Every structure is written in C-alpha cells, then in structure tokens.
Image (cartoon, coloured by chain):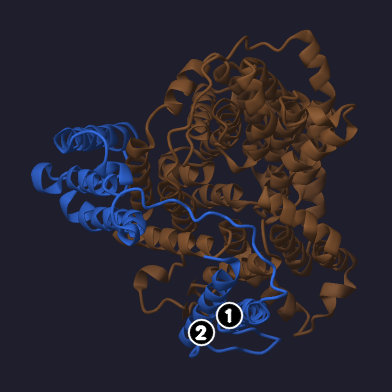
Chain colours: A brown, B blue
Amino acid sequence: MGELFDNLRLGFATALSLLNLALCLGGCLIGTLIGVLPGIGPIATIAMLLPITFNLEPTGALILLAGIYYGAQYGGSTAAILVNIPGEATSVVTVLDGHPMARQGRGGAALGIAAIGSFIAGTIGTLVVAGLGVPLSEVALWFGPPEYFSLMLLGLSLAIVLAQGSLLKAGAMVLLGLLLSTIGADLETGQDRLTFGFDDLSDGLDFAVLAMGMFGFAEVLRNLESDEPQPKIESKIGRLLPSRADFKQALGPILRGTGLGAVLGILPGNGAVLAPFASYALEKRVADDPSRFGKGAIEGVAGPEAANNAGAQTAFIPLLTLGIPPNAVMALMVGAMTIHGIIPGPQVITNRPDLFWGMVASMWIGNLALLAINLPLIGLWVRLLRVPYRLMFPAILVFCCIGIYSLNNRPSDVLLMAGFGLAAHCLYKFGFEPAPLLLGFVLGRLLEEKLRQALVLSRGSFLPFVSRPVSCGLLLVALAVLIVALLPAVSKKRAEVSLS
Amino acid sequence: MGRVSGDLGGGLCLIGIAALAIWQGSDLELGTLRQLGPGMMPRVLAVLLGACGVALAVRSLMARSAPATAVQEPAVPPPVTASGAGGRWASLRAPVFLLAAAGAFGLSVRPLGLVVAAPLGILLSLQASADATRGASQRRRLLESVAFAFGLTLFCVLLFRTLLSLPMPVAPWLIGY
C-alpha cells in the first residue's frame, strides 16, 4: 500500500510539471473539441496529431494522446445530449435519455450529471489502473509465446462478437485485418511479402494510414451520402448543476456503471464499447419504473456515461501491462511509444516508472480538468455544433492529408489513405464493419511472431497451446464466447441491438 | 440493395481479395511447422478469408433460390442521395471529388508545397457536397469557397509549420522550403 502511494507521488510529480500539465489540458481540450464535432473521431484525430508528438518527450506525448482520448469521450456525450447525434460511437446510449432531458429543458442537468459521473468513474478507473498495473505486469512476466497467442485469439474472438451484425462478416474482417498486417518485410527472413512490387510497402502498412482512411476519410464519405439536414440544437440548457434529488437518484447508477465499465474495459478486444449498453440494460432492469427510460430518466444518462469513462480508463491496462492494445486508439499509443524506442509491455513499469505513473496521474488530472473545461465552455461547444458540415469536411480532409503526409513525408501515404477510405466505404455498404478489421491489423504482427516462436520452442507441436493451463484456459474462454454468441437466444438479441 | 444481393457482392469481394493475396504470395516459402516460412501466415489467412467469402456467397444464393422461406429485411428506404439532378451521378459525386482532392494533395504537396496543395484539396473537396450546387447564387458560393480555401490554408501553414514545426514543404518554388 505504501509503495502504491510512493508510486503515485512520483506520478503526480511527473504529471504536474508545467509542460506535462499543459499537454494534459491541451489534449483534453482538443479531445472535447473533436468529440463534440460529429464526423471526426478520436482515432482519426490521434492519427492526425501523431507527428506532433515526435518532438515531445515520450511521457508528454502519451499524456497528450491520452488526454485527447478521454476528452473525446466527454465531448461525445455533449453532442449526444444537445443535438441527438452521438459524437462518438460510445455515446450512442447517452442519446436515448440525454436528448429527451434536453428537450424538457433539463439539458444542463444531463450534462452536469454526465460530467460528474464520468469524473467519479474516471477517478475509480485511475485507481484500478494504479492498483492492478504492478500485479498484472508481474503475471505477464511469465507469459510465454503460447499464452500471448491465446490471449490475442481471445481478444479477436471478443472483437468478432462485439461487432454489430453477422458474425461471419465480422470474422471475415478480422481475417482481412490479419492479412493486411502481413504486408511488408517478413519478421525473420526480411523477404518482401504481398507488396505488389512497391518499395513504399516493404516497411508494412502504417497503422495510422489505415486508421485514418477507415475512420477519417470513410466517415466523411458516409456523412456526405446520408445528406441529413443540419440537426436542430436545443438552445435551452437550463441550470448545469444537478439538483440534490437528481444526484441522489444518479449515484447508484454511477457506481454500478463504473464497476461494469472497469471490468469490461480490461478485456482485450475492446470490451469497453460494450460498457454503456450493459449499464443501460442493468439500470433499466433494477429501476422501479422501467417505463421512464427513453423519456429522460437521469439514471439512463448517469450509468452509461460512468461505464463509458471507466472502460476508457481501464482499457489502458492490457496495453501498459501486457503490451497488447485492446482497441485502435491504444494501437496508436503503441505507435507513439515505439517511435520513442519504448516497447510496450510488462517491463515498462519497472524500466520507466515515471512514464507509467506519470500517465496514471495525468489521467486523474485530465478527468478533473475535463470537469472544469467541459461545463463552463458549454456555450462554445454549442456554437461549434452550428458550423455547417459543408465547410467542416474539407477542413477535416485537409487535416487528415497533412497529418498523414507528415508521418513519413511520403506522398504515397496520402493516396493509400484515400484508397483505404474508399475500400472501407464499399465494405461498409456490404455490411462489413471496420472495427474488427483494425483490431486484426493491430494484433496481426504480434500474433504471427508469437505463433512462430511458440512453434519453434515446441518443435512444431501445437500441444503447448492446450497443455499449458493459462493458455488452455484463455482458448476455452475464446471458444465459449463464440459459442454463446451463436446460441439462438443471444444471436436474436444481437440482431435487435444492431437494428435499433 | 437488399441484404441478399449485398451478401453475394461482399462474398465475391472477399474471394477476390483472397485470390489476389494467394497469387501475390505464391512465390513465398511456406516452411514447415517447426519453422514457419514467410508465406505460411498470408496463405492460411487468405484461404480462411476465401472460405468466409464462399460461405457468404453460398448462403445468399441459397436464400435467393428459396424465396418463400427467405428472411425479408424490414423495408429500409434507400438512402436519399440524389436530391439534385442526375441520380446516378449524384451518388458518385462524393467519392469522386474526395478521391480527387486527396490525390491532388498527395501529388502536389512535395513539388509545389502546402500553399498549392491545400487550396487545391479544399476546393476540390468542397465540390463533393451536394450543397455546392444549390442554395445561394453561384457567384456568392464561388467567392465563399475561394475565401474559405485560402483562409484555411493560411491557418494550416501557421498551425502546422510555424506553431508545431512539422517538416511540411510550404512553397519550395517561392521561398525555398
């Protein structure tokens, strides 16, 4: 326990340096900005801003990127409540009760409770990261190649199950992502693979290029095609501080949502996206009068928002302890770390305690800052929501181009990004989702490396994957997850969720 | 596009991608289980991907040949894209202009710098929106577009080059960097 406090003190000393504090605040501000704006998400923004972090010291770079990430979660809820459009995929649930509250003139209370709930969840989530980081990284130290392989397989099967729509299509997208990751020089022999003779491809595809194409460029295409009229913004916000009764009603949902989110966030394979849905379903079940939900129940805002933020926080755990990024944002963090020569994994905590604990501390500072930034600046965010999309998307596009070009100073990256964007758009029209593809791509290289190592160690036998208890357990869970998703009752539920 | 024909198209796409990958990886060594070669992973993944494609395509063909039992999608109205003239052209408008914008940016940024590439990209992408052709008078729209393109370019130069000092060529033919 005393050690934890010493570590946290080191973390706060790092995070409170003037530069890091400024980066944390700046990141939160940028994150909120893009979270509020529909049509540009955290993945595209982090990919876009990655080149900026080249000049920074690694701790500062990660603090900035992390700030953008959870700032975007906050901003997304603002758009959801005031405009009835989820600025982020994770705030889909907030729309259900948040927007009705805004229509009743209680938008301020909804925003307030979302911010307070997120702060409480963020605080607890930060403590979970701090508490679990060291023990989990010790567990990870005796993970061998078979365990890593099985864990990643579990992550991929979760990604398949968590995607919307058909399991077969999500599985195909994971395979496609894995296949794309094999492009470039072979890890052992250095031979060019699937490069079609282009020299620019022999380093492999840049993850930022792929992510920006699929989440920046394709998103613009999709928005232009849906051609919706400018949404109506609720201008009456009302008082921001929730009343005592509101707060009393919301406290239970906040704590339950935090618990759910924290547990789901740790799962590899982006379990955090599930957290708001799970929390909403739970609150509806335990409520005295479930019919209020969908008509402006404050529990329906507080629970999912807390779950969302707790999940966003604990999603750092697999990255920081095992070196396995659970989602696309975390994969970009890996990119930022490797640029500075830091290989994410269990050794980070021991080798770079300032980096690990500085990041943990900055998460809490960032959450506090968001509470202070988001609420007073509401007027500014509302005004931003009024910028017409016809002027916004050219700006998004040019920022994407500049960001991608400055990653490697390679014009071909810009063209590749546009190509992937168009391909993703076509796949989307056929009912394929981009998220499982990205996770497959993210884990692909590591998966192949660990598989090959494991087979060399076992002299070509697959036995260790099932004879080593941890690996076997992970594989069984992966199998169970897929089987459960195929059960008729569950697959019907999934179909309902994706239709609504 | 109904679900059934979409699945057929999607399945065929996957099969095509798998075939492309197998063809490209055909000269790579597969290796043995003891020592996997560079070609093994791509080959296995491509075969699995192709199998997914076949499964999708077959499923949709079977659903089509048995229309009495086929699951009917709830009638989703086709997305309204063609609010201006020429339905088919209108749905291609956004992809064509956005690709052109990114392409023009990518090709011009190194030789001509940001001061040419950015306005080019912005002006081309502005044309992608169906809004470009309706509402206010053409003349006013044009003025607005040009002003917006140059304003945004100035902003980009100040932000990315001056403030963040990214190594972007600004105008190599004019000021040398």
Q: Is residue B18 left or right of residue B56?
A: left
Residue A460 x, y percent position in the rendering: 75, 85
Q: Residue at x 54, y 29 (%)?
A: A83
Q: Residues within 10 Å of mark 2 (few under 14, many from 20)?
A: some
Give residue A361's quadrant in the image: top right
Asked if disc 2 and disc 1 are in contact, CB closer than 8 Å, the reply is yes
Figure quadrant of residue A199 = bottom left
Give the secondary structure at mark 1.
helix
Amino acid type, residue under disc 2 in the picture: Ala
The front one of B107 and A383 is A383
Q: Nearer the viewer, residue B155 or B40?
A: B155
**In front of the other: A79 or B130:** B130
Q: Chain of mark 2?
A: B
Count up the numbered dots. Answer: 2
Residue carrying label 1:
B46
* x, y percent for residue B133: 25, 44
> Farthest residue toward the left?
B174
> Which residue is located at x 71 percent, y 12 percent?
A242
In the picture, measured across the screen, residue A440 lies left or right of residue A335, that is right
Q: Chain of mark 1?
A: B
Q: Quadrant of residue A244?
A: top right
Q: On screen, B4 above or below B58?
A: above
* Residue at 32% from the left image edge and 36% from the top image edge: A391
User: Do we see residue A350 in this rendering?
Assistant: no
Rendered-image quadrant of the N terminus of chain A: top right
Q: Is residue B43 visible?
A: yes
Q: Is residue A142 left or right of residue A95?
A: right
How far, Cα to Cα, is label 2 from label 1? Answer: 7 Å
Q: Amino acid at mark 1?
A: Ala
Q: Position of residue B123 (x, y in %)?
A: 22, 45
Look at mark 2 in the image and give the residue it sits on. B19
